[in-house]
Amino acid sequence: MGIHHYFRSLNELERIYRCPGKFKFEEHSVAAHSWKVVQYAKTLADIEERNGAAVDWKKLYEITSSHDYGEIFIGDIKTPVKHASRELRALIQQVEEGMVERFIDENIPEEFKSIFRQQLREGKDESMEGLILEVADKLDQVYEAFAELKRGNTEKEFIEMYRQALIKIAGIRLHCVDYFLDCILPDMVNDEIVSPVDIRRITDEALVNRRSA
């Protein structure tokens, strides 16, 4: 079918919802999530550049814009399930990568296959761009969970989503992480909207190890 089949498949990301059945106030599609991750990542990368880092922007845009393409084939698997064990996480990633590879083999013209393998690969690694992707991905989890908690969704799943995403972000050594935790997160926590959940306490608990380091 050629690249047309790839372009057409992108519509499916608009119909795949994150954490299906759990959001009470706002639903979030994988397509919307991917767009937000790109926006977060470019600002995070700007912060890194202002601190003297060299950013590979082409790589950054490739891995952030396509990082969840494989969910077309497997859907969104909730974070607690996905990370229940390293073995399960590795198996899910193996299945996802195998299905992406099969899609490329069956649909993409030969002269573009290597390009698509590069662009649709798992982008999270120890490179600066890979770490920025990790931060941006978790940052969207923070904002998604935060919005639900602020509006009265007290389900434990969102409390844990918020807490674990903050812990993950705080453990990554980047200038943009420090900026987020020191300058952006306080604005979120100090929001005057009343919530039945003590977001400030959850935030402090998540970051206690960072503050004591």
Image (cartoon, rainbow, N blue to C red):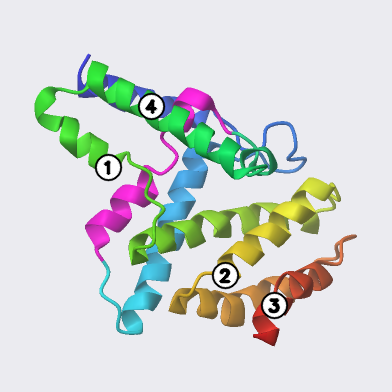
For label 2, the residue is 171
The boundaries of the magenta stretch are 56-76
The amino acid beneath tag 3 is: Asn
* Residue at image point 52% right, 79% down: 179
Q: Are marks 4 and 2 in contact (CB under 8 Å)?
A: no
Assign a secondary structure to mark 1: helix
Marks 1 and 4, how far apart at CA: 15 Å
Please indicate whether residue 63 sits to the left or right of residue 81 in the image: left
Give left or right: position of 90 versus 39: right
Give the amino acid at mark 2: Gly
As drawn, 181 above or below 34:
below
Q: Position of residue 3 (x, y in %)?
A: 22, 24
Secondary structure beneath dot 3 equals: helix
Q: Are marks 2 and 1 in contact (CB under 8 Å)?
A: no
The quarter of the displayed image where residue 130 is located: bottom left
The residue where tag 1 is placed is 119
Mark before the other along the chain sequence, 1 or 4: 4
Q: Quadrant of the C terminus?
A: bottom right
Q: Label 1, label 3: how many angstroms apart (C-alpha)?
A: 36 Å
**Where's residue 108, x and y in %?**
20, 23
Q: Residues within 10 Å of mark 2 (few under 14, many from 20)?
A: few
Residue with the mark numbered 4: 98
The answer to whether marks 3 and 2 mark residues whose Cβ atoms lie closer than 8 Å is no
- Could you tell me which secondary element the residue under label 4 belongs to? helix
Query: In this image, 168 relative to 30: left or right?
Result: right
- Mark 1 vs mark 3: give the one in front: 3
Q: Earlier in the sequence, mark 3 or mark 4?
A: 4
* Disc 3: which residue: 209
